[in-house]
Image: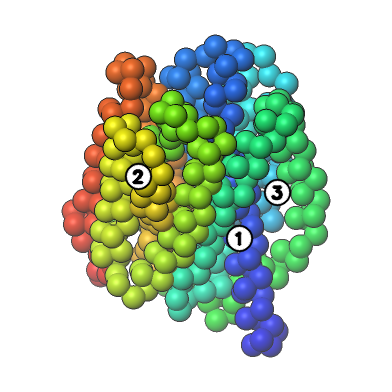
Amino acid sequence: MTRDALKNTAFTVLAVCFLMNLLARGVGETWVVFLLPVGAEFGWSRTELAGVYSVFMIVHGLSAPLVGLAFDVFGPRASYALGLAFLGAGYSIAGHVDALWQIYVCVGVFGGIGVAALGMVTASGLISRWFRARIGTAMGLAYAGLGSGVILLVPLTQWTIEQIGWRGTYTWLGGALLVALPLLLVLPWRSYAAGHPQYASMRAAGAPGGWTLARAARDRGFWGLVAVFFFTGAAIYATTIQVIAYLVEIGFTPFKAATAFGFAGALSVAGMTAAGWMTDRLGRRRTAAITFSFTIAGIGFLLLLALKPGAPLLVLFVLCFGISAGSRGPVVSTLAAELFPGGGLGAIYGVITMGMGVGAGAGSWLSGMLYDLSGGYVACFAFAAAAAALGLAQFWLVPELAGGRRE
């Protein structure tokens, strides 16, 4: 393969990762607009409704190591096909549920497995086979697909619910994903999975300098990355599971609330891209400090909205929270690829991602519980801000996360 052909293939791989992330995050985040109409029909409590998202994120996290292992053994074609099949089947069936446990299975379990397989576990392993120089920028661009999915699919889903109801919308979403499955399978996956020849020697887990999951599990940097993702997940998802309902309750229309959420997702595209760029130029610790500070500020503006609802504070929330919501992802992905190179990266990054899933599940569930106990949102959002501060602290508590591999 010529140099130009290799370059074109690398960028094609990056585009595929972007698109799969768009579907994963965009479809996964639609629960925030299903929450109110589903709750209105069945009369479920906020804790029960938040529990769906909690199960979704916990299953997402627990599935991630298995997805990483499947990627290492069977390659990206199998991982992505698994994701579309589970997510499409789960959402197709969700349009016909009549009991709480059924929505937990369809959206929580099937959705969690599907999103894990379509997301950054597979993308990180694939991108690390094609990029070395400026890998942070490449990871940031792939992560931008997550934000693009939110801005495109969450408002579209809200609009579709208003036109055909939540049941029809679930059926439509699931069917579209299943239609996309055969199109995915015909792509030239053998070429994509082979990676750049220059980096082939590092892909074997047993190669000199290659890392396995067992070896990584004895490393302090590995657990530092797990902790960063855990606290980040708790902070972000304790906020997002409540934000649309909160905005509606303080006076915004459902469509305006969903649109604000979507714009936050759009800004996360720029934020994740910028975070990848900053990790290559400013270092991990400075990038983390900037992004976590924006997250905490955004949560603060959200709280102030209860005192003075209006466009100025809403815009400040969208700007701060949106631009920082997914920006830890490129930092963690880049550090994982740099600290743990080799054929075991899929499984390693899968376990690190499990920290995100467990943190997000715990955060979303605690957020619902705190709402039911307190009757308001102050405790939910204060918890989210504290979790963000703990995520930032890891970059000072674990020296490896500042950006260097010790030997």
Find the distance from the CA under tag 3 to the CA under tag 2.
42 Å
As shown in the figure, which amino acid type bears the numbered disc 3? Answer: Ala
34 left or right, relative to 296: right
Q: In x, y percent, where is residue 209?
A: 40, 70
Instruction: Using the image, tell me which numbered label, if any, was put on residue 81.
Output: 3
Instruction: Using the image, tell me which numbered label, if any, was put on residue 168.
Output: none
Q: Could you tell me which residue is drawn at 54 percent across and 26 percent down?
A: 35
Q: Earlier in the sequence, mark 3 or mark 2?
A: 3
Reply above or below: 39 against 218: above
Q: Could you tell me which residue is drawn at 50 percent across and 59 percent down?
A: 269
Instruction: Using the image, tell me which numbered label, if any, was put on residue 17.
Output: 1
Mark 3 neighbour density, 10 Å: few (under 14) some (14–19) many (20 or more):
some
Mark 2 neighbour density, 10 Å: few (under 14) some (14–19) many (20 or more):
some
Question: Disc 1 vs disc 3: which is toward the camera?
Answer: 1
Helix, strand or loop at mark 1: helix
Q: Earlier in the sequence, mark 1 or mark 2?
A: 1
The one of 50 and 322 positioned closer to us in this rendering: 322
Reply above or below: 255 against 67: above
134 left or right, relative to 309: right
Helix, strand or loop at mark 3: helix
Q: Earlier in the sequence, mark 1 or mark 3?
A: 1
Q: Can you say which quadrant of the picture contains the C terminus?
A: bottom left
As shown in the figure, which amino acid type bears the numbered disc 1? Answer: Cys
Q: Could you tell me which residue is drawn at 60 percent across and 60 percent down?
A: 17
Q: What residue is shown with label 2?
A: 313
Q: Could you tell me which residue is drawn at 64 percent across and 88 percent down?
A: 3
Q: In x, y percent, where is residue 196?
A: 59, 77
